[in-house]
Image (cartoon, rainbow, N blue to C red):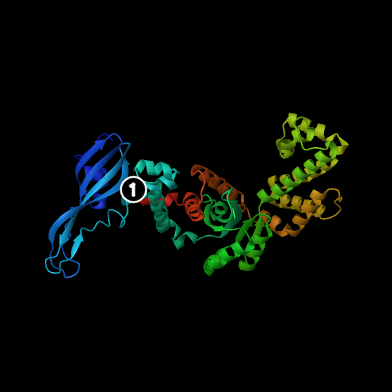
Amino acid sequence: MFNATFKAPDLDSFCLLDQLGLTAVGQRLEPDGAVLECRVPEEDSWCRDCGAEGLPRDTVLRKLSHVPLGWRPTTLWVRVRRYRCADCARVWRQDTSTVAAPRGKLSRHAVLWALKSVVIDRLSIARIAASLATSWHTVNTAVLEAGRELFINDPARFDGVHVVGVDEHCWRHTGGGSHYVTVIIDLTPIRDGTGASRLLDMVPGRSKKVFKTWLDDQTKGFRDGIEVVAMDGFTGFKTATAEELPEAVAVMDPFHVVALAGDALDRTRQRVQRDTLGHRGRSGDPLYGARRTLRTGADLLTETQHHRLQKVFTSDDNVEVEATWSIYQKIVAAYRNPSRLEGKKQLQEVIASLSRGVPKRLTELVSLGRTFKRRATDILAYFDRPGTSNGPTEAINGRLEHLRGTALGFRNLTHYITRALLDTGGFRPYLHSYLR
């Protein structure tokens, strides 16, 4: 801007003090921090009880952590005037509710800055606390309370949800008690092509009762609006959906269908490995060396990988692995077929072939066939509803793993759920607009 108009430097506006109802009267800069001495310019001399005008009595000092300025933690020393009523002897102080919450240790702008650092910048609470020169507990409490008030407790965030994904998630790997929670994801933006998926809620435990209770706690309007529920092979989620959302369509997404087939392939390979060589896979064993190649789609194999598989399949001992690999590749090919109608037909043929005539020796395929036959309607429903997949749910699970790593683990499940909602609840655009 070549013709920009500049104003005289204004410490109050630059430090956002005017928005808090403060004015700076002094400053002290130190290598490890900065202090701004402030006052509340507005008089507050009228008695709350009798309405008479009070007389100035003294001032008290309130110290608040503020938004870091100039790479320094910044503290506000707010001189708050106290008054005394000559008629009723009441003593009160100037109203500072616009500056900070009652008994709060962070200015309201510092709370928003900390919330922005968690939601948008994905900083740890420890890093934010260091920047504010205050304790971890002070920052954590302020961030969680502000996040709940501004975003999480807003019932409008459940509006417009028509496609949900449900899955389990391990929130910790040590200690006693349940380590799993049920996560519910809004997949509507993925289906409609309007944005990314977002975390709706996280409930302790993983069972039919957990998901059923969560659905029952929602409003009737929310339940009536759900059209599709994407899930894995867990029967409990399927039963809860059928009981609470009778009009919704259950979809077993490709991620978990392929994962089931891949697990069957791995178990077959491991069983044949033990039967033929008498031990688990080791470096140099053909089957063990091809374990990753077996899970690669046939259309993506390199020439080297083709030769590796041919070498494995030339042995009569590995015929069961080849049979299971063939089923796995047919399932992958069905989902990769550009024609959804043709892909559905391919998968129907696979399910039908697994439902009859599979040799009992192929225990892994027999078990897979029973699962596919029981959930055939849910598996094939994917092809009639483009964009319905639990893949984004797994992506959010990955982000939650990153969150747990950033925080070096969580001990409090309530804190973990709130942090998870702030991190993956889709609040970033709203916070950006809130900070403008």
Establish if 350 lies above or below 246: above
Q: Quadrant of residue 166?
A: bottom right
Q: Position of residue 358 (x, y in %)?
A: 85, 51
Can residue 191 be spotted in the picture? yes
The residue carrying pointer 1 sits among few (fewer than 14), some (14 to 19) or many (20 or more) residues within 10 Å by Cα, namely many
Q: In the image, residue 160 lies at what x, y percent?
A: 51, 60
Count of numbered labels shown in the rendering: 1
Pointer 1 residue: 110
At 44% across and 60% down in the image, what residue appears? 153
Query: Going by the picture, which residue comes out furthest to the front?
Result: 176
Q: Is residue 169 left or right of residue 127?
A: right
* Left or right of 224, for residue 113: left
Q: Is residue 181 above or below residue 1?
A: below
Q: As shown in the figure, which amino acid type bears the numbered disc 1?
A: Ala
- Please name the residue shown 21% across and 40% down the image: 27
User: In the rendering, at what x and y percent does residue 350 appear?
Assistant: 78, 51
Residue at horizontal 86 percent and vertical 53 percent from the top: 357
Q: Nearer the viewer, residue 435 or 278?
A: 278
Residue 432 visible, this orientation: no
Instruction: Identify the image quadrant of residue 204.
Output: bottom right
Residue situated in front as seen by the camera: 308 or 191: 308
The percent coordinates of residue 182 (x first, y second) are: 58, 56
Name the element at disc 1.
helix
The image quarter containing residue 307 is: top right
Which quadrant does the N terminus fall into? top left
